[in-house]
Amino acid sequence: MAGFSDPLNFCKAEDYYSVALDWKGPQKIIGVDTTPPKSTKFPKNWHGVNLRFDDGTLGVVQFIRPCVWRVRYDPGFKTFDEYGDENTRTIVQDYMSTLSNKLDTYRGLTWETKCEDSGDFFTFSSKVTAVEKSERTRNKVGDGLRIHLWKSPFRIQVVRTLTPLKDPYPIPNVAAAEARVSDKVVWQTSPKTFRKNLHPQHKMLKDTVLDIVKPGHGEYVGWGEMGGIQFMKEPTFMNYFNFDNMQYQQVYAQGALDSREPLYHSDPFYLDVNSNPEHKNITATFIDNYSQIAIDFGKTNSGYIKLGTRYGGIDCYGISADTVPEIVRLYTGLVGRSKLKPRYILGAHQACYGYQQESDLYSVVQQYRDCKFPLDGIHVDVDVQDGFRTFTTNPHTFPNPKEMFTNLRNNGIKCSTNITPVISINNREGGYSTLLEGVDKKYFIMDDRYTEGTSGNAKDVRYMYYGGGNKVEVDPNDVNGRPDFKDNYDFPANFNSKQYPYHGGVSYGYGNGSAGFYPDLNRKEVRIWWGMQYKYLFDMGLEFVWQDMTTPAIHTSYGDMKGLPTRLLVTSDSVTNASEKKLAIETWALYSYNLHKATWHGLSRLESRKNKRNFILGRGSYAGAYRFAGLWTGDNASNWEFWKISVSQVLSLGLNGVCIAGSDTGGFEPYRDANGVEEKYCSPELLIRWYTGSFLLPWLRNHYVKKDRKWFQEPYAYPKHLETHPELADQAWLYKSVLEICRYYVELRYSLIQLLYDCMFQNVVDGMPITRSMLLTDTEDTTFFNESQKFLDNQYMAGDDILVAPILHSRKEIPGENRDVYLPLYHTWYPSNLRPWDDQGVALGNPVEGGSVINYTARIVAPEDYNLFHSVVPVYVREGAIIPQIEVRQWTGQGGANRIKFNIYPGKDKEYCTYLDDGVSRDSAPEDLPQYKETHEQSKVEGAEIAKQIGKKTGYNISGTDPEAKGYHRKVAVTQTSKDKTRTVTIEPKHNGYDPSKEVGDYYTIILWYAPGFDGSIVDVSKTTVNVEGGVEHQVYKNSDLHTVVIDVKEVIGTTKSVKITCTAA
């Protein structure tokens, strides 16, 4: 049963497609109608066409928005009503017509669809008929698509009217680009649109392939966590299947640079960015399926992208828009956007598997403080638990958790701990309440198995997984194959008992871990109960959650593919039949999704968290889970391959609207050489490159495994290591530079943290990520599709205007420590003059023309060469940029008010919006955003149900969430316009719901930077004329050495309706 021969298990994509060639599918449409399914909540908002095919199968094509469509095909369905109106849990509303209705209302959009018989095909079209004024920058009357449904052979062709890109040098007497519109195909399938293979014995196993045409000039980005290997994907197989894939090498054994490896997180979403060259069009595709998705991206046929599912059929969304930012906005309108996160998340963090007692935490924090290295967070691993019992603390090694968390918080440190979804079977003195209550109320997944096609006998059961590139079969009856913490349970007695919990377990290595039960998180009442379990830890003073082992990751002796047994029956969490049972492999990624969801809502319901923003750092889940959690990219290692993919992974995830994402800085596992010998710490060169290259990525956490593996990885430990290792004397400068250079770049990050925060706020509004691919910020630069393509892998933008080009190769690979840096077209750029401290001002250097490639030498310098630290990583600033900076503190919020200064660079006109609030309260959020309005309304409805479940227990806010969003923030627009010799800066409040004087003080600073022109000339600032309007007290300073005009405005920023500063050169 199960094991190698079982079809109900993971299948590598290349094996899947080797047999898919012989599968057949529908060839002709034999009937259409537009009748909504019976479950439709808003029939007027159901825009669909039902298709009946010649082989007896059925399909549905829908419009969700005027330029968003959905293709559904399940070869097992016999009626159109089986498709229904209900969504998976990924989509933000339970019913699609409800979502369409709410989005129409929110966006002020009116549109219509119609289906016409056009002879050889049916034309299914959408058209915008009315737009509210506030939406006219995004939509206009007449927008829409035409979907041609070809009758025989059946295929789908999506057509949109496209506008050419703006001509940088227009042809005389030729109509402007905006007038030269034309109809273009933006997405289409092959004449073999669907292929299927229904298993004769297992009705849930219905392999289905969707063939999408891949134009030769198309370029493809996205793919979520799996997009890190190449930002623009080259032909490959891919496996979306959440998997505890230590060091990304378990299935194929090729390591971090292999695109085929299934990773911790599944985001089957990608963008075609160049199928219509020289036109404004991006097309995105998303496959919504919690099981395995096997992709053949042009590997077996360069003309097609083959999207294959094994269970649940095809549920595919397409989106067409002019730009990548618009795609992000539309996509996050479907799967949701995150809520505001606490400001301290943007600070520096330290984690370690091996901080084993209170004194370890105090020591680490004190050493950070002693060397004045900013730090906001400490992450305590399972070491804090009492016998690896989730939600507990160890009374011997962490005897005073409340005092400990309080002391750390008083020193600026916010703490999280590792929470895994396993509840130890080991009770303890005084009772392990989570275990006892879970068993009593039957909240755990029961051992109920699907045994069709097997003997049904426990002794014949075998599990399967991949490790080190090998396919391995495991006998769960073999006690010797179980974890090193020893577990002698009777597998046959538990097997398929139906009324006893499934017995699994997690091993953390080194004899650590526990056998345990798994909460049935696909049940609503269990999710509520799970959220309640956090009460003790947060009453003690925990501040946020580190959600680990999320697959759930289970020891190989307890299940398949390091997870649940694929044949275990679990709750489906279906909208219409929540108690329905499905195989674990059918809902594989749903468990981790609901784990993050349960934790998020649970924290929101804690009385101790009232009006406090929560944060979860998750290891892996499914598309849309960033509504609840940030993402770190799993168990990497201290090698250059993992550093090389880290930037591209974050950028790829950002295209999905992910706000907080990043890798373990420095690598979690040790590097292992060709002889299998492990290094005892991350190499100093690699750690410097990782910190400096990551300094403006959204998530910055140094994380490593200690135990008997690594000795240290904290930057301050490197110079100390020299004291006991005189043999390293020739490298002493390098070890000392770790602390000095890494601290410099973390300080620079802290000085720019308002910029990161403003981007995080923007993400809540429109889904734009903090760290951005140049495809998001420079949408008209078409060189990214040819000679500049390679730079998309290894450069990023912080916000719109700071370009960072990390050094991703060792000195051994590139002895000169240099790299090419590409500066996007149509803008002038300046070498960054941003420094951590006010007294380190540097004049702006010579401008560089956009489109240039600069060969930049970025050597790691000696610790005494402080004035050269800025050159260790290339950083450039776009012309016209407006960049806020604040004083560096040792943690966010330390020391009271922190004045903002705005660095304003010469060049093109620009508006920059800054968001000011207390950084921790939920009520800061804009009150009109759907992710706040909808969840609050939902929580009110659920209140009575939760109250009944909680009973007389105290410490919970049964309404689920407080009316979170009250607009308690101040949004201020800082705008620069330039004309002739005059630069005008306007400071205007756009939303005034908060007094930020406590955070930013009672004055702010405007710094107008002047730079040499391309001819070498520069403005004499001493002769400029400055005028300040708005009736505000101010002081003007002119610095001829730095070529700056500095204006201190003596009021809380945004108090006056409009402050206007004009500076005119002589």
Image: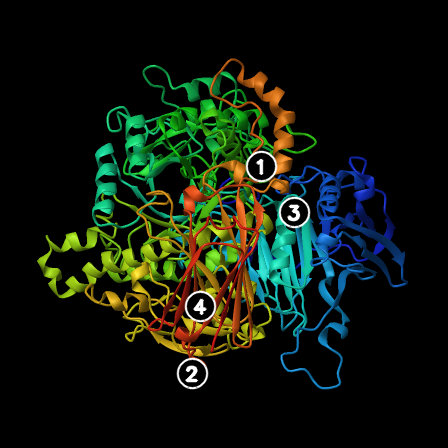
Mark 1 against mark 4, which lies toward the viewer? Answer: 1
Query: Which of the labelled discs sits on residue 1017, or is there none?
Result: 2
Alpha carbon separation for disc pair 3 and 1: 24 Å
N-term-proximal mark, 3 vs 2: 3
Q: In the image shown, does 1051 or 313 lie closer to the viewer?
A: 1051
Please name the amino acid that badge 1 sits on.
Lys
Q: Which residue is drawn at 68% across and 82% down?
A: 170
Which element carries disc 2, helix, strand or loop? loop
Identify the residue shown where x is 63% and y is 26%.
Answer: 940
| Disc 3, SS | helix
Query: Which circle marks residue 334 in the picture?
Result: 3
Residue at the spot of label 4: 877
Describe the element under mark 4 as helix, strand or loop: strand
Quick check: 740 left or right of 893? Answer: left
Pointer 1: what residue? 966
Q: Where is residue 251 in the image (x, y as percent from the top left)?
A: 44, 52
Q: Nearer the viewer, mark 1 or mark 2?
A: 2
* Earlier residue among tags 3 and 1: 3
The x and y percentages for residue 218 are: 62, 69
Badge 3 density bin: few <14, some 14–19, many ≥20, Cα 10 Å: many
- The answer to whether 704 appears left or right of 865 in the picture is right
